[in-house]
Amino acid sequence: MSIEIKVPALGESVSEATIAKWLKNVGDAIKVDEPLVELETDKVTVEVPSPSAGVLSGIVAETGATVEVGSILGTISADGKGVAAAPAKAAAPAAAPAPAAAPAPVAAAKPAAGSPIVLPAARKVAADAGIDTSGLTGTGKDGRVTKGDVLSAPAKPAAKPAAPSGPRARAELEDRVRMTRLRKRIAERLKDAQNTAAMLTTFNEVDMTALNDLRAEYKDSFEKKHGVRLGFLSFFVKAVIAGLKEWPAVNAEIDGEDLVYKKYYDIGVAVGTPQGLVVPVVRNADQLSFAGVEKTIGDLGKRARDGKLAMEDLQGGTFTISNGGVYGSLLSTPILNPPQSAILGLHKIQQRPVVMPDGSFKARPLMYLALSYDHRIIDGREAVSFLVRVKESIEDPARLLLDL
């Protein structure tokens, strides 16, 4: 008996993926729920488990192919019979079958004569980027325009083409690799933030002396009791939440002509991975203890580096913290993570001379803080006051513990 391996649902607004690699070869024995193939979406890498025990009898879509939700990836022979001698040649993915009860499309939804059929995900990306799809050549089934086709098209006539216009002078000394879906998505979102938001950055610096002393005193007992190290990020998460409660515009977003003020605090923490930057979200961070925040960040960071994040881990954040200091950055201007209206950049802790109240100089561990924000919704007074609130909370951590 032959069983089809299909592309599973990939999450909200995600309709297609690229086959990153097959984990099994044709003829391999497999167990039920054993990972068979990795799919790369524009957000995460997803493993497709085996729907049945048996033998991998055929591969329909090979590494590098673009596949849609519901399309066939390969087949499993439950009885071990009918196994192909070699993987099948790469084939165009089958389109996802429509639900049996799905209504027929209305006439208005049909494209004009000569116009390509544009998939919904591709249509949304094209609308956001201002791309005319009428002149695009689709690479999907029956010439359908996919999101990948839209992403590879220039956003405007003056834009640089995706492909080189001619031979490169020193091509033999260059390596050329195709951008991953994640890298394309990062580029798309960052450029969208720059093109859409009225982005501005305000800076401050924080004296880390008190926090260093507190961690030195309690880090051993904290780790012994909670099984996790006491780091800096939990304090910054708590400091950010205190500031967001005092200045709610920093936790808001623009939705059309409305301002949406959020009364929950889902804090994104940027994590660098071999595949690119991802921002998993600490849900309801205001309801977690310091240990709970540290454990959640540690778990999300590990799963991000292992490529094990789920789609829901990356969705719905209200504010983001990016720590370039772990790479040695002294100062930077972080870019917004849409639709959020603000992002806090942390930087390297460095000893610098400080004038004390008595006029003497002392070396103190200082860190520059950078808050990038959308000036359409956040005024300068709110942004600066928020950042000062974060600074005060870190320089006097007792304020966080006493909710002051």
Image: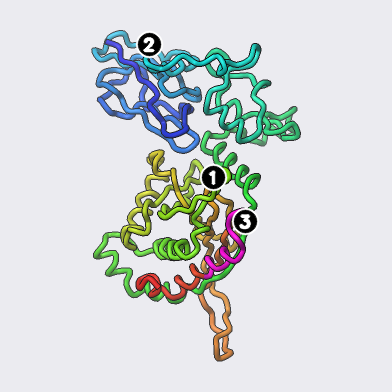
Which one is in front in this view, the residue at disc 3 or the one at disc 1? 1
* Three-letter amino acid code at the position of disc 3: His
* Three-letter amino acid code at the position of disc 1: Asp
Determine the image quadrant of residue 129. top right
- Decide: few, some or many residues near mark 3? Use Cα within 10 Å; few <14, some 14-19, many ≥20: some
Q: Are marks 3 and 2 in contact (CB under 8 Å)?
A: no
Magenta-drawn stretch, dominant element (helix, strand or loop): helix
Image height check: is 374 above or below 138? below
Mark seen at residue 195: none
- Judging by the rendered image, the residue that carries numbered circle 2 is 85
Where in the figure is residue 62, as x and y percent of width and height? 46, 20
Determine the image quadrant of residue 204. bottom right
Q: Foreground residue, 7 or 131?
A: 131
Mark seen at residue 375: 3
* Secondary structure category for the residue under label 3: loop
The magenta-colored residue range is: 375-388
Spatial CA distance of label 2 from label 1 is 54 Å
* Three-letter amino acid code at the position of disc 2: Ala
Which one is in front in this view, the residue at disc 2 or the one at disc 1? 1
Single out the residue that lies furthest toward the bottom: 358
Q: Foreground residue, 265 or 92?
A: 265
- Judging by the rendered image, the residue that carries numbered circle 1 is 255
Q: What residue do we see at 42% from left, 55% from top? A: 263
Spatial CA distance of label 3 from label 2 is 61 Å
Q: Is residue 35 left or right of residue 255?
A: left
